[in-house]
Amino acid sequence: MLRGNGGQEVFFTPRDRTKFYSLLHEGVEKFGHRISAFCLMPNHIHLVIQVDEAPLARIIQNLGFRYTRHLNRIRKTTGHWFQGRYKAILIEADAYLLQLVRYIHLNPIRAGIARAPEAYAWSSHRAYLGREQIPWLHTESILCHFSDREPAAQRLFSDFVRQGLQEGTRPEFRQGSHQGRILGNDHFAEQALSTRGEPNHCRPSLPDIIDAVCRAYGLPPSALTDPGKKRKPAEARAMAALIVLETQGLTLTDLATHLGRELSGLSQAAGRLHQRKIREPGAGERLERIRKDICKCP
């Protein structure tokens, strides 16, 4: 899930959406992942992705950076368009994949901008019904659950999606069930966290983040609250802000209050650092080291 910064729209014309399609296509060819479903809403994006060897972070950062560059060029602006780091949830496919695809295809109906899923032009639903061809979209792994004959599978899939028309918001598809990153039973979550080499109790507090950032930069925590704009403390504050944005249960308001800083300044600094870590490998590597250090905190 990628959201517009501050809730702002990220698609303004069909040309923007078509450009996003082409970037998705280029990404699939470059990184080798599968996209099983998508929905481009005016101010946010849903993607169901099965990664191969390239990490998800690299895929999404490349996509976000290139689309931001497109918007800045077309609209003659500068800066970032997306809100902090993307939100990603690892799902247990057997239990949730079909429901998730249905939920995503019904997003325009819940938002009141379409009366039927097939009436919305910018999701994968019409392709699932055979009404348009999207070469980079992988539908087989979903349709095979309904029938081994394509016309029958398409018809049964359409019925399945319509059965969810009265379904309300599903918080688990936004928040996950384990640390906000995993949706599945306990065994699946334990296995996923073990594969990543992470303890399943990793839910950092604000002091955990500040301490880990200060260790990485060789600074005392007091340096982040000192007045002034020295480069090293300023970058450390930006790093802390970026990590807070991706941490469930914490907000930039919490960090701004703790550090005695303006919320807008922290938000802008996090956005600049987010763009740097896409362009500069060193910035991204430092962020990953800090994340790992945070997850060691008791």
Image (cartoon, helix red, strand yellow):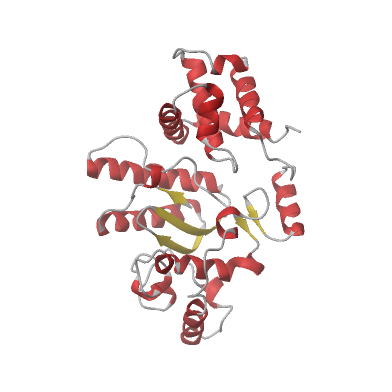
Q: Residue 102 at x, y = what percent?
A: 51, 70
Please tell me which residue lies in front, 131 or 162: 162
The number of discs equals 0
Rendered image quadrant of residue 211: top right
- Residue 67 vs 112, above or below: the answer is above
Please tell me which residue lies in front, 273 or 63: 273
Q: Residue 240 at x, y = what percent?
A: 55, 29
Rendered image quadrant of residue 121: bottom left
- Residue 96 vs 215, above or below: the answer is below
- 128 horizontally vs 167: left or right: left
Q: Residue 246 at x, y = what percent?
A: 55, 40
Q: Residue 132 at x, y = what percent?
A: 35, 74
Residue 282 visible at all: no
Residue 65 visible at all: yes
Q: Residue at x 35, y 64 (%)?
A: 122
Q: Residue at x 48, y 67 (%)?
A: 138
- Residue 39 vs 70, above or below: the answer is below
Rendered image quadrant of residue 248: top right
Q: Residue at x 51, y 21 (%)?
A: 260
- 172 horizontally vs 29: left or right: right
- 298 horizontally vs 271: left or right: right
Please tell me which residue lies in front, 257 or 76: 257
The quadrant in which the C terminus is found is top right
